[in-house]
Amino acid sequence: MARSKDFDESEVLAKAVRLFWLKGYNGTSMQDLVDALGISRSSLYDTYVDKHTLYLKALEFYQNTGGSQVDDIVANTESAKEAIKQLLQLITGNLLKDKQHKGCFMVNAEVEVAPHDAKVKDIVCKNDKQVEEAFHRAIRKGQESGEISGKQDAKALTRFFLNTIKGIRVSAKSTTDKAFFNDIINTSLSVLD
């Protein structure tokens, strides 16, 4: 008979995200996980098998949490340009609040682990696709209403914004200058005219 978990898995995954985000996959030991997660080593192994499986679960947890925020903004904002602005502000705002300059957990995984790990690469690609689809929905909506110029291809604009987001996320590892990010947001929004 399988033992029931004596911990809140969402809470454990949130703690794992914070630890992997701070130290990276390779910099995080099993002892670090035991210490930070507040569960026994046996519970950790019983539930997640190994560090790699826990890392995959943490990435999926992070992706699901952030993805729902992105989808909510696009679905609940009337103006397409305003939705895109709010998406960019959400991303930069979250990064600017981080006093440890960790950057983006997903981008960190893309750089550190994905080149050597197909499962991590799949999660990163799924995350990129979700963000890309949200921006594409907003851009198409804006083009259909005439709010956004139709002179540029919606897919090309979407890819421009996806690349802009990745650049913002990397830049946040070295700067917390809000004016720097506001310049990027304002310049990015100007391509929609």
Image: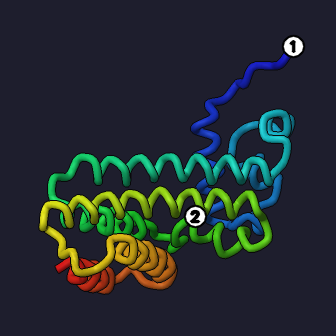
Q: Earlier in the sequence, mark 2 or mark 1?
A: 1
Between 14 and 113, the one lying in front of the other is 113
Image side of residue 173 versus residue 117, left or right? left
Spatial CA distance of label 2 from label 1 is 36 Å
The amino acid marked with disc number 2 is Met
Disc 2 designates what residue? 106
What secondary structure is marked by label 1? loop
Residue 53 image label: none
Q: Residue 55: give x, y in percent of width and height.
A: 72, 53
The amino acid marked with disc number 1 is Met
Between 166 and 172, the one lying in front of the other is 166
Image side of residue 171 versus residue 76, left or right? right
Quarter of the image where one finds residue 148: bottom left
Q: Of all residues shown, which one is farthest toward the left?
A: 146
Between 2 and 153, the one lying in front of the other is 153
Between 86 and 138, the one lying in front of the other is 138
Circle 2 Cα neighbour tier, 10 Å, few/some/many (<14 / 14–19 / ≥20):
many
Circle 1 Cα neighbour tier, 10 Å, few/some/many (<14 / 14–19 / ≥20):
few
Classify the position of the C terminus by image quarter: bottom left
Disc 1 designates what residue? 1
Q: Residue 87: give x, y in percent of width and height.
A: 32, 63
Q: Of all residues shown, which one is farthest toward the top?
A: 1
Q: Are marks 2 and 1 in contact (CB under 8 Å)?
A: no
